Image: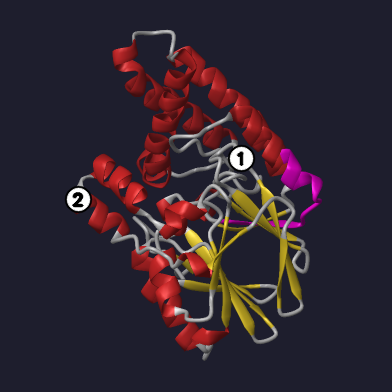
């Protein structure tokens, strides 16, 4: 199948590949509803021209984009918010209460990411982070809703991956835009057994009980599909959701086992254990990619998830 930067989905939704790191790693979504539009997730600052190009390609007036929505403020989801808001004069940013201040003043986000990656790598990966005028920011609490033309969007607080995370319920599609709460599921790992799914424990706020409660909260809405940032539309989510819940417990057990050794080698043990675990699960699921190809798909997440598990272990021990 030829890669598509823009992929039409049902219910007036278009998936946009954010072009971060490699194809089919991260997505954002354009939603159209009777002349009004919303952008859900923004990718990085580098993604902004791709989103605007899609609007131009579809003949959509930028003034009809009513909402920009980021499920949380991690930069693969919200790094493009400021640049996009600057280009969309009528848009309001809808954001979690704990995330709003970081969009209005992103200096701490930028400083933190620069400290991790270095200035050159930060610029290559994320570009920049542009502040948003606070008068254009609307906080969405648990259960709040907005109307996009005649289409209702309902927001649910879903901590566990991050404390500043919400998910967006779209009753028209019977779908949920899940950010990172419902894990990762890449198209190249789909087999006859369905999608291969895994939790994401990116630093620094992994909270296993909260994450499991949030996953159950999403499933309790009886969705028919999930729109994942990583990556794309996943249908019939009940069974993958049950697998995801079990894998959160497996991650905890794996991390606790790795923590039983010396602290200096913790990160290396976590990466090795997580790689072995996920490769084994993928093989059980019927994934036939070579180890090298599988590393290409999962290696980025294995490293980030190991970092998150390390932070979680160290916070428990402090």
> Can residue 141 be spotted in the picture?
yes
Q: Would you identify the image quadrant in which residue 269 lies?
A: top left
- Drawn side of residue 283 relative to residue 225, left or right: left
Q: Percent x, y for residue 23? A: 40, 60
Identify which residue is drawn at 32% across, 57% down.
Answer: 126
* Percent coordinates x, y for residue 38 in the rendering: 59, 73
CA gap, disc 2 to disc 1?
A: 30 Å
Query: Which residue is disc 1 drawn over?
Result: 159
Q: 308 or 225: nearer the eye? A: 308
What residue is at 56 percent from the left and 55 percent from the top?
71
The C terminus lies in quadrant: top left
Question: Which residue in the protein does label 2 denote?
Answer: 119
Rendered location of residue 25, percent (x, y): 44, 55
Q: Is residue 315 above or below residue 210?
A: above
Question: What SS does tag 2 mark?
Answer: helix
Say if residue 238 shows up in the picture. Answer: no
- State which region is magenta: 216-228
CA neighbours of label 2 inside 10 A, class few (<14), some (14 to 19), many (20+):
some
* Lower sequence index among marks 2 and 1: 2
Q: Residue at x 31, y 46 (%)?
A: 113
Residue nearer the viewer, 158 or 12: 158
Q: Is residue 100 magenta?
A: no
Compared to 282, does 65 lie above or below? Answer: below
């Amino acid at each position: 199948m030829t890669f598509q930067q823009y992929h039409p989905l049902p219910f007036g939704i278009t998936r946009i590949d954010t072009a971060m790191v490699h194809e089919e790693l991260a997505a954002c979504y354009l939603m159209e509803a009777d002349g009004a539009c919303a952008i859900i997730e923004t990718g990085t600052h580098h993604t902004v021209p791709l989103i605007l190009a899609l609007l131009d390609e579809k003949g959509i007036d930028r003034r009809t984009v009513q909402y920009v929505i980021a499920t949380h403020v991690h930069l693969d989801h919200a790094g493009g918010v400021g640049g996009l808001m600057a280009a969309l004069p009528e848009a309001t940013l809808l954001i979690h209460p704990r995330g709003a201040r970081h969009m209005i003043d992103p200096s701490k986000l930028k400083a933190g990411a620069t400290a991790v990656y270095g200035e050159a790598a930060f610029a290559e990966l994320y570009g920049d982070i542009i502040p948003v005028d606070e008068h254009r920011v609307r906080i969405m609490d648990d259960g709040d809703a907005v109307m996009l033309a005649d289409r209702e969007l309902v927001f649910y607080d879903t901590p566990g991956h991050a404390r500043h995370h919400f998910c967006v319920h779209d009753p028209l599609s019977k779908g949920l835009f899940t950010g990172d709460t419902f894990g990762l599921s890449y198209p190249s790992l789909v087999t006859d057994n369905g999608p291969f799914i895994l939790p994401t424990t990116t630093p620094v706020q992994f909270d296993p009980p909260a994450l499991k409660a949030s996953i159950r909260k999403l499933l309790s809405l009886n969705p028919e599909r999930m729109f994942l940032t990583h990556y794309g539309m996943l249908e019939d989510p009940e069974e993958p959701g049950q697998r995801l819940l079990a894998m959160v417990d497996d991650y905890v057990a794996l991390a606790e086992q790795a923590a039983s050794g010396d602290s200096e080698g913790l990160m290396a043990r976590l990466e090795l254990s997580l790689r072995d675990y996920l490769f084994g699960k993928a093989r059980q699921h019927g994934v036939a990619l070579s180890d090298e190809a599988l590393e290409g798909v999962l290696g980025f997440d294995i490293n980030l998830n190991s970092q998150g598990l390390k932070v979680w272990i160290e916070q428990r021990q402090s």
